[in-house]
Image: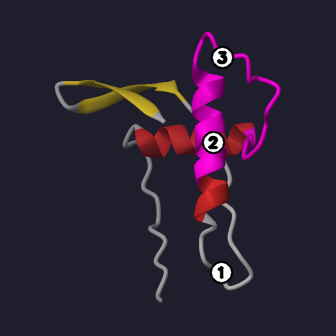
Amino acid sequence: MIIELRNRQPVRVIRRTFGTMAFDHGGILDSVTYAKDAFDQVRRALPLSSSAESQSGAWAPSKTLTDRLDRVALGLERCPRLRVDP
């Protein structure tokens, strides 16, 4: 997410991108797939990109979830933190 700040305070969401992460059978992040998907997302975001047909790693949340993510990003709602123990 790209958030506009004024006087160091969030005022609006300018852009959102969402993606997925791949994990191997052992629960470890598949960094090769993650890097490829991240690169594809950057290429799709570029105005001169011709790779719009590639949707690898793309994900679109519901409007309800998008609205909640915006409220959290703007500091209007608290979000519980995820904790992962090794």
Disc on the earlier residue, 1 or 2: 2
The residue positioned 17% from the left and 25% from the top of the image is 7
Amino acid found under the numbered disc labelled 3: Ser
Q: Toward the viewer: 79 or 27?
A: 27
Give the label, 1 or 2, closer to the camera.
Answer: 1
In reply to whether residue 66 is colored magenta, the answer given is no
Q: Are marks 3 and 1 in contact (CB under 8 Å)?
A: no
| C-alpha span from label 1 to label 2 | 21 Å
Task: Answer left or right for 62 relative to 33.
Answer: right
Q: Nearer the viewer, residue 26 or 85?
A: 26
x%, y% of residue 66? 63, 39
Q: Earlier in the sequence, mark 3 or mark 1?
A: 1
Query: Where's residue 70, x and y in %?
Result: 52, 37
Q: Residue at x 46, y 59 (%)?
A: 79
Q: Position of residue 30 (x, y in %)?
A: 64, 67
Q: Earlier in the sequence, mark 2 or mark 3?
A: 2
Q: Which residues are magenta?
A: 35-62
Q: Nearer the viewer, mark 2 or mark 3?
A: 3
The crowding category of the residue bearing disc 3, from other C-alpha atoms within 10 Å (few below 14, some 14 to 19, many at least 20), is few
**Which residue is tagged 2?**
18
Majority secondary structure of magenta residues? loop
Query: Residue 31: where, in percent of width, then height?
Result: 58, 62
